[in-house]
Image (tube, helix red, strand yellow):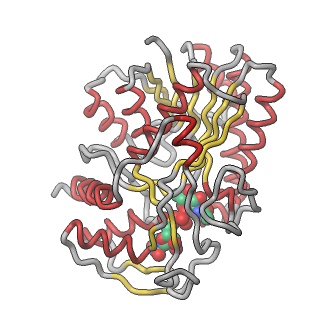
Amino acid sequence: MDKTVLVSGGAGFIGSHVTVELLAAGYNVVVADNFSNCDRTCFEGVKKITGREDLPLEVVDFCNADEAKAIFEKYPIDAVIHFAAFKAVGESVAKPLMYYKNNLQSFLNVLQAALDKGGCNVLFSSSATVYGEPDKVPVTEETPRKPATSPYGNTKTMCEDILRDTVKASEGKLKSILLRYFNPIGAHPSALIGELPRGVPNNLVPFITQTAIGKRECLSIFGNDYPTPDGTCLRDYIDIVDLAKAHVFAVTRMMEGKMKQDCEVFNVGTGRPVSVLELVNAFEKVNGVKLNWKFAPRRPGDVTAIWADPTLANREMGWKATRTVEETLKAAWAWEKHLAGK
Ligand code: UD1
């Protein structure tokens, strides 16, 4: 096979895992990143895992239209997977313009550059955040989107709309798949790549692993009075390698012309709700570590319960989540220990 995939934001948490899986499936990959929110650890890890010392890396700021265009001129790109975006919910509330500018501009430039070269396949990394607080769970792709609770979430909804409209107007030049991720967690089984948050983690699992290793004193479980079986929020935690594999299925579907519409949407989740407390208990049990945690007030903007109905992705793409939460939490802990040199 001689197909080339551009992975924007390819040195980040999801991008690095996706790069590994694309290479394993035989695709040529061009990693593009401006390293604004990650260092080179994961890019180096990808090279080690795959033995691909020659893996092309382009240091690009997709907010610069000329830089975006230059990448599409340089490589024969068959598909682009767009990850390059800011992703901290709290920060987006404090700095909305920074989020709208970065997340929208970079995507607009990617789409324009792709169109200028005659078009290609586009995979956009969307989020379950577009469902807001759903009236009914699990959510299917038909579940109505709701106003997001943050500017970050709004950028996902807006990029979905931008993509849909652009594909429609492109007269077949662009084909696209939107993947709506639930909660990606874990790390590669090699422990050579994983999540590397800057500063204090916002997300649950990095906070758990950093508390277990001693970098944080105590995990706060935000809210124990939700209308759920144990009072804590319910989420659909999807293993990062399973999630990465969904991208390979989606890219192949686009490349092989198997799409039923020019713009398709798939939920990428397990279909299994897990509470915060269950996740914390499972982490302690499977890794044999004691975690210092306490209940704390609810975090503003959190939804009570959301999990996926992944039937469409299972049926149409032939993709299915395979890993248990226990396996995933083991991998997350191995990665944290690897970072600590233990
Ligand atoms: C958030 C974003 C989602 C984004 C995802 C990954 C929203 C509403 N959600 O999901 O779009 O894709 O991050 O970046 O915009 N928790 C604690 N203690 C902590 C941290 C988290 O109890 O220290 C709880 C939260 O209250 C929540 C669960 O753990 O119930 C998961 O939180 P988190 O990992 O931050 O993900 P989400 O908020 O679900």
Q: Residue furthest right?
A: 169
Residue 22 sits above or below residue 313 on the image = above
Q: Is residue 232 left or right of residue 96?
A: left
Q: Is residue 196 left or right of residue 52?
A: right
Is residue 280 shown to the viewer in this render?
A: yes
| Image x and y of residue 18, in percent | 44, 36
Residue 190's quadrant in the figure? top left
Q: Is residue 77 left or right of residue 35?
A: right
The residue drawn where x is 54% and y is 55% is 182
In the rendered image, which quarter contains the N terminus?
Answer: top left
Q: Is residue 121 left or right of residue 34?
A: right
Q: Residue furthest left?
A: 342
Q: Nearer the viewer, residue 208 or 235?
A: 235
The residue drawn where x is 62% and y is 34% is 62
State the count of labels.
Answer: 0
Residue 305's quadrant in the figure? bottom right
Residue 60 sits above or below residue 292 on the image = above
In the rendered image, which quarter contains the C terminus?
Answer: bottom left
| Image x and y of residue 120, in percent | 65, 20
Residue 296 sits above or below residue 151 on the image = below
| Image x and y of residue 309, in percent | 57, 55
The residue drawn where x is 46% and y is 83% is 230
Q: Nearer the viewer, residue 266 or 331?
A: 266
| Image x and y of residue 209, in percent | 31, 65
Q: Nearer the viewer, residue 325 or 212?
A: 325
Residue 60 sits above or below residue 281 on the image = above
Is residue 88 shown to the viewer in this render?
A: no
The residue drawn where x is 39% and y is 64% is 205
